[in-house]
Structure formats: C-alpha cells, structure tokens
Amino acid sequence: MILLGRTLASAVAGLLLFLSFPPRTLWFLAPVAIALVVLALTAPGRDGRTPRLRTGALLGAVFGLGFFLPLLPWIGVYVGPLPWIALSVAESVFLALFGVLAVLTSRLPLAPLWIAATWSATEWVRSTVPFGGFPWGRLAFGQSESVLLPIASLGGAPLLSFAVALIGTALAAAVAAVLGGAGRRTVAAALIVAVAIPVGGAALRTTLAGPTDGDRTVVVAAIQGSVPRLGLDFNAQRRQVLDNHVQETLRLADEVDAGRSPRPDVVVWPENASDVDPTRDRTAADAISAASIRIGAPILVGAVLANADGTSTNSVLVWDGAAGPGERHDKKIVQPFGEYLPYRSFFRLFSSYADSAGNFVPGSGDGVVLTPESAESAESAGSDAVALAVGVATCYEVAFDRAPAEAVTAGAQILAVPTNNATFGDTEMTYQQLAMSRVRAVEHSRSVVVAATSGVSAIIAPDGSVTSRTALFDADHLVATVGVRSTVSPATVWGARIEAALVALGAAAALVGGVAAVRRRRAGEPDRRDPVRTKTTGTEESAENAGSCNNSPVEPDTNSETSPIHPAGRGE
C-alpha cells in the first residue's frame, strides 16, 4: 500500500466516521471507519513494510480533517470559514497523535486492545486541552441509535467510545489476518471480539429503565418559544425572545385549563430564553412571574445575568410564581471563542467577529437546583410536597462528562439541558447535541428534558429513546410524565475511573511500544523508523527504494518481528 493509497484510505475513513453521526442513523459506519484508518496506519505495503511514526502522524491528521471538516461547519455559519477550518485543523492534530500511537503499539501482542486504548487516551486529551478541551465528535456521541448505546450505562461515554474503537481494531485485525495468511484462530478471535461487543450491548438494553420507571413520577414541560431571527443577533429585538417564551407558556396553560394536557410540575425554558436580565428588569420579571402563576408551576428560566464587574453569567433561575427567582445554576463550562475569548487582542487580528465574543465567567456548584413540587403531584403520590432535584447542563456543558455526572452524584433526579442553537442556523449542530443528551440519559439512568430556543427540543427517557420532540424553528411545547429516580448507575460511580484506566492503559502501551522500537534500533533489527539493511551490499536503503527493481535485492530478515495486527508485515 503506497503512501497515496494510505492517505486516501485515511480520508475516506474520516468521511465514513462523519457519516456515522446524527442526524443520520448510520452508526455502524463508525467501527468501519476505525478499521479502515487502522489498516492504513498498520498494514504492510507491497515491500512488506509498515508506516513510520511521521507517516502515522500524517495519516492521522488526514483522517481528522476528513472527519472534522464536514462535522463542524456550523462553527462558521455566521462568522465565516476561518474559525471552522482552524478548529478542524486543531482537532486533527489530536488524531495525528492517535496515528503515532497506533503505529507505536501495532507490534505489541494483543495490538487491537492497545490501539483502542490509545484512541481513548486521545479522546481524553482533546476533551481536556486546550482551553478546557473540545469533546465534540467523540465516538460515543455518534451511537445514540446504536445497539451499543446501553454500554454507556456501565462506563459512560468513555467506555462506549472504547467499545466502538475496539470493534474497529478487531475488524482491522481480522482483515489483516486474512490478507496475511494467518491461521483461522487469529481470524476467529478477532471476529469474536467484533461480534461479542454488539451482542453484549443488545443484551444490556433489557436492564435500562423505561420512561416512567422510578420512585415516583412528575410531569415536565419544555418550552420552545423560537426567535425572531437566526444568527448572532437572534436577540436584537429587545424582549422579543422572552415574549415568545412567555406566550408559548401561556398557550400551554390554556391547554391545561381545557383538559388537553396535564399540568406540569416544572417547566424548562431554553438557555437565553430571557434576552434581558430579569433580576434587573422589572418588566421582564413581572412577565415571567405571570407565566409561572398562570401555568401553576416553577419555571427554569435561562437568562444572561450582568455582574457588577462588567462580566456576565449564563444562568438558569428557578422562578416560582410571585416568589420570583430562587436557586440558580451558573454555567460552569463556558465556551471559549464564543462566551469568552482567550487572547482577545491576538485573535481580533484574524476576525472582526472576535469582539462579538462575550465576557462570561464560569459559575460554581454541583449543577443541581431544587424546584418546589406542586401540591397536585404530591397528592397523587400520597406524600407531602417535596422538592424536585434537577441537574442542569447548559448547552455546551452536556458535551463534558463531568457536568451531568457531578449533578447526578449530588442528587439530581432528572436532567435538564437548556440550549440556544439559534446562533448556528439550520445546521446539524442541534442533532449532534441532541445525541449527546441521549447518551447522558443512558449513562446516568435519568430522564432528560432538552429545551432549545429554536429547536430541536425533546424529552428523553433513561433508555435513550426520544419520547417526544419538536421541529426546528417552530414555537412549540412538550409535556411528558417521567420517572423520578434516586438510584445511580454504574457509569455515574465508575465512569471517570474507567476512563482513567483506559487512558493509563493506552499511555502504558505507547510507552512499551516506544521502548521496544528503541531496543530494535539499537539491536540493529529492522524497525519502522529505520531503513532496511541489505546483506548483499552492506549498505542502508530507504523504505521507498528497498523494493525497487533498480536496487540490489533485499534479503528477508527471518528474525524480524511481525505485527500482531498484520502477521505478514515487516517493520521498517
């Protein structure tokens, strides 16, 4: 396989991985994509040689560009292509690192396991740095329709990503074994792994909770008031976004009064639903209070609150009728280059939109807000009115494992994801984010209420199924009876530990692979990063010329190591 062929295969693999993500339901393309890029990174060429480390970095970067460029165009829909391309290139650097790690570990025994672990390590790194990381595009987030989704209940998004990667590396090993003439046992072992994981995922589905399973039930509502216009100036018409959400809440109240809908115990508005600070604007406060009194339930109001020092917080307030605001969640994971701009003076040299970035500061706390439960719901449950603990992950926060995990650990009984996708227009972003909420529902065995300003809003059951949803750009509302759960899933308890173990496993494998490569070089054995030493001339020839008909023939080194993932291959 010449370099051009490897490069094309890596690009195709990246495109296949993109196609596996929502709104498409082609989740099964993800392990195929991983298999294809692993073959490109580790398969021996016609001369029997496998890629060097720098070639691995190149192929990994090409794979990353083939994936991120079509995945992330929503970044630049209103600010131009530069931020989109820059972010895609930056994220591709992490997949270049994966390419290097895959090459390093491909010679180790049980190579498919170690390569999958290095994928997990790479996902962790890019979800952590720089500026807090960017987890978008993790393998787990493309599996919301997959038979593998229940695996998230055991180890969260990290284990689900690892499972997808392991299926892919096992498939690559099976193909390599067939092409390399390996024994049937090798092929069978790889195929058993590739088949057993989906079978296990399907078996786990029976263990997931249903929409109303739990200690008791409550009625939740999501309001999608829509916006007067899409884009960065979605809130240019003062109070129009707030008025839209007030009016949609009143429309729901009319349906409740007419008996067409049950009265909700809690109403969730989207992020930025109040486009003016209701703690400083009396008219806005009165409108929200009136809506809460009319619907007979507290409202979780998304609003931007101004601080005395000129900064802002992206907050969700519990607004309970005439009593007004109570507990609040201030968004803890704020979005770089959107809600704040690091190195503002530098980046404004590249884009006039730099000064459009906000000056938001992160909040603190565990992400849980307590909402008073209606007397009607308490009476139906045969108990006194008790507070409902809602875990809030505002928009961007849902992409990060720690946000919902901290909330559920702190006692959250349901999860709410208020989001504002109006600034991303008619793109796939909202569907990609909705898939994350579905993974979180299974991961923590909680119902999830997604409320979006312009769509898509949804009610998600603990088994990841979407019980109801809205369309884009419509003013609408959703009402559903959901289970209130207090037990925690294995993923809530063990997810972070499992990720740490996978990262450590990948790092250790890369270290062992690197040490082995250095020892081979010192011993004079053929290695991926060294030229092949010929016995006929006593000179060294480059990898590109070693198999050429114009050179002295290369005598095979019968003592050279073979790659476990490619038994017939020789290292450089």
Image: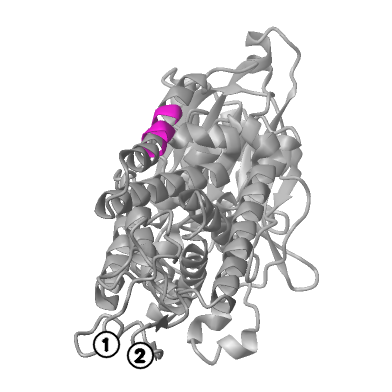
Q: Identity of the amino acid at label 1?
A: Ser
- Classify residue 297 by image quadrant: top right
Query: Looking at the image, do the residues carrying marks 1 and 2 touch, with CB atoms under 8 Å apart?
Result: yes
- Classify residue 516 by image quadrant: bottom right
- Residue that sits furthest to the top in the current view: 382
Viewer can see residue 64? yes
In the picture, which quadrant includes the C terminus?
A: bottom left
Q: Distance between the residues labelled 1 and 2?
A: 7 Å
Label 1 sits on a secondary structure element that is loop
Disc 1 marks which residue? 552
Label 2 sits on a secondary structure element that is loop
Q: Position of residue 62 (x, y in %)?
A: 37, 73
Q: Within the magenta stretch, is there residue 487?
A: no
Taking the spot 52% from the left edge, 32% from the top edge, the residue there is 221
Taking the spot 52% from the left edge, 20% from the top edge, the residue there is 207
Q: Position of residue 554 (x, y in %)?
A: 31, 79
Q: Identity of the amino acid at label 2?
A: Thr
Between 535 and 104, which is closer to the camera in this rendering? 535
Disc 2 marks which residue? 537
| Number of residues whose C-alpha sits closer than 10 Å to that of mark 2, classed few (under 14), some (14–19) or many (20 or more) | few
The disc, 1 or 2, on the residue closer to the chain's N-terminal end is 2
